[in-house]
């Protein structure tokens, strides 16, 4: 089927008078998670990872993915005539220059790309004499016969008891930044920005509690907000008040800006698609291309949001413990596999107050599947689990007071001897980040090596970042902060939530990852320094630890953490889990 789709797309290119086309994995809002109607990359290639791009010419096709998805992409492509390469601008550009000829035209959908994203490609294509052209219509949309309808669920107010600040206060605070920059409006490029600014949530995107939206914030704190007509109800209108104009057509946003006599707009180049920038410039509006101030404001959680996150993590930890306590008996059954494990964990979370959805598709990897960093289990791929080997479960929940994300690696019985060494080195890196104290102004890339040192000592590493930001009942992957090798130049600030998830992956054998969410706080002992506080509460697998590899301080950290887990969660779990929890959190000396 996918080969037929590929051939249909190649035929459609000629009608648009182009010799190639780019198919990114995103939507017009540059969301990480996208509605089914925007899963064009998965429809074309069957690859359903959260990051990737396909390039198709009339004669060749290639899929570009990063290190998280190398194995998954190879499996999902199968025998299709699609080459696989690394998702790097230079690799994409070089492939395009080899697949196209001088004078050829490469088409793209301007709603699905940003100018910074295209810039490296354009530079290299110009050198090869290949033209990059924005298309009025996406050729995939004309051949995708059973394409799902765009979602338009209701948008709902998100109470101040969870946000800690009302929308008017947020709008005035951000509007002052507009005045400081001498800008008349801020372009609100995506649903996450709008969700935070207006204190609204929805259910238009899987695992991301937002309503599809975009708009303008003006210098006086008023705004124009686009939402689908079905998303707007009386409660929402009352919540937003008279300062927020609602429109149900995207073109009406630009008309509203003209009525406001807007001539200067601040737009985030990483969030704003090419089509929007063209619409603004076509109206002779000057555009300031700088990072959206809401992104940074949203990342720093206030005291209400942090307390909410603590509460959500306690409930989530209790659910995870009940799942882990049942796992040893469950795997002794005949029909329990990776998929059944996901369903069992979901059932445990659904029993907890406020649970609304998983925060992402759970990564449930037994044995070799655990080595696929972002493995997504399907009925076809689900391995039957047994009382032996190593199992990795990476999952999270969405609660009105917080978003969770936790990974635990579990020994189900007998396991390869070398796994102890690998697991302990990952744990040492995890503890190194968790216990770190660092000066104000430190960026995530400056501390990443602490998580990797023990692995590096053994000539080992992992091909993903060490930590990502997390939203407050928003995206489980939120910027601008992160911990990784790549430069961000974004200092970690008090109030930011970030994951701590070093790992190691032995192809076809097992995957190891230990992930907690932590937040940045001011050091109570040293002025001008920051440190982390744990949010996630769940036992770390003791059977996989080699104590002789750990220092006394590392063992003390682990014992202290397990004591906190035991004392906090013991009253919240059933009797069977209490017995299990007491056993797995005993001190190691």
Image (spheres, rainbow, N blue to C red):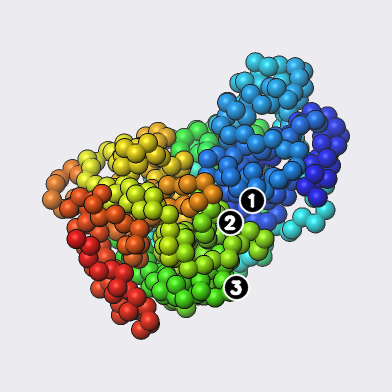
The alpha-carbon separation of the residues under discs 1 and 3 comes to 26 Å
Q: Residue 335 carries which label?
A: 3
Q: Nearer the viewer, residue 345 or 79?
A: 79
Q: Residue drawn 58% across and 34% down? A: 86
Whether tag 1 and tag 3 are in contact, CB under 8 A, the answer is no
Dot 1: element: loop
Q: Residue drawn 21% across and 46% down? A: 437
- Left or right of 504? Residue 31 is right
Furthest toward the bottom, the residue is 575
Dot 3: element: loop
Q: Residues within 10 Å of mark 2 (few under 14, many from 20)?
A: many
Q: Which corner quadrant holds the C terminus?
A: bottom left
Whether tag 2 and tag 1 are in contact, CB under 8 A, the answer is yes
Q: Mark 2 — residue?
A: 376
Q: Which of 409 and 296 is in front in this view?
A: 409
Q: Where on the picture, by quarter, is residue 305?
A: bottom left
Name the mark nearer the viewer: 1 or 3: 3
Q: Mark 1 — residue?
A: 48
Residue 40 visible, this orientation: no
**Could you tell me residue 88's position as x and y percent?**
56, 32
Residue 369 visible, this orientation: yes
**Could you tell me residue 148's position as x and y percent?**
74, 58
């Amino acid at each position: 089927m996918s080969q037929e789709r590929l051939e249909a797309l190649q035929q459609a290119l000629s009608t648009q008078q182009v010799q190639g086309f780019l198919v990114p994995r995103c939507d017009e809002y540059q969301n990480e998670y996208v509605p089914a109607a925007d899963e064009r990359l998965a429809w074309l290639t069957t690859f359903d990872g959260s990051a990737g791009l396909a390039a198709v010419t009339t004669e060749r096709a290639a899929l570009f993915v990063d290190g998280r998805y190398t194995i998954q992409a190879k499996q999902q492509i199968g025998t299709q005539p699609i080459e696989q390469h690394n998702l790097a601008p230079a690799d994409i550009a070089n492939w395009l220059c080899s697949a196209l000829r001088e004078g050829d035209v490469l088409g793209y959908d301007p709603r699905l790309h940003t100018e910074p994203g295209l810039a490296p490609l354009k530079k290299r294509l110009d050198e090869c004499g290949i033209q990059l052209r924005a298309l009025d219509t996406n050729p995939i949309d004309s051949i995708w016969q059973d394409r799902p309808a765009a979602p338009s669920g209701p948008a709902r107010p998100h109470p101040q008891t969870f946000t800690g600040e009302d929308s008017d206060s947020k709008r005035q605070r951000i509007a002052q930044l507009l005045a400081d920059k001498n800008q008349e409006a801020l372009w609100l490029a995506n649903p996450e920005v709008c969700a935070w600014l207006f204190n609204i949530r929805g259910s238009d995107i899987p695992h991301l509690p937002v309503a599809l939206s975009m708009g303008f914030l003006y210098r006086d704190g008023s705004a124009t907000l686009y939402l689908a007509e079905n998303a707007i109800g009386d409660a929402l209108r009352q919540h937003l008040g008279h300062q927020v104009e609602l429109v149900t057509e995207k073109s009406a946003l630009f008309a509203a800006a003209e009525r406001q006599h807007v001539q200067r707009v601040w737009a985030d180049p990483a969030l704003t698609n090419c089509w929007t920038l063209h619409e603004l410039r076509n109206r002779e509006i000057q555009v300031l291309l700088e990072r959206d101030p809401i992104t940074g404001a949203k990342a720093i959680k206030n005291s209400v949001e942090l307390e909410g996150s603590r509460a959500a993590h306690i409930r989530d930890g209790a659910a995870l413990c009940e799942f882990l306590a049942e796992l040893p008996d469950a795997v002794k059954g005949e029909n329990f596999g990776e998929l059944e494990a996901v369903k069992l964990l979901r059932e445990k979370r659904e029993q907890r107050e406020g649970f609304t959805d998983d925060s992402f598709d759970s990564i449930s990897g037994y044995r070799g599947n655990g080595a696929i960093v972002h493995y997504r289990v399907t009925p076809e791929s689900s391995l039957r689990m047994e009382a032996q080997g190593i199992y990795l479960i990476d999952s999270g929940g969405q609660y009105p007071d917080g978003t969770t994300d936790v990974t635990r690696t579990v020994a189900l019985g007998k396991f390869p001897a070398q796994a102890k060494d690998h697991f302990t080195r990952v744990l040492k890196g995890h503890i190194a980040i968790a216990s770190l104290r660092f000066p104000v102004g430190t960026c995530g890339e400056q501390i990443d090596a602490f998580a990797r040192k023990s692995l590096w000592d053994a000539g080992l590493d992992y091909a993903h970042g060490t930590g990502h930001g997390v939203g407050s009942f928003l995206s489980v992957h939120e910027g601008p902060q992160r911990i990784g090798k790549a430069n961000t130049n974004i200092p970690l600030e008090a109030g930011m939530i970030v994951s701590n998830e070093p790992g190691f992956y032995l192809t076809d054998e097992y995957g190891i990852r230990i992930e907690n969410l932590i937040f940045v706080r001011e050091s109570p002992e040293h002025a001008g320094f920051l440190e982390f506080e744990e949010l996630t509460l769940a036992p770390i697998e003791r059977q996989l630890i080699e104590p002789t590899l750990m220092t006394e301080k590392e063992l003390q950290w682990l014992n202290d953490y397990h004591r906190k887990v035991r004392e906090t969660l013991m009253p919240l779990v059933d009797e069977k889990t209490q017995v299990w929890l007491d056993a797995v959190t005993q001190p190691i000396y």
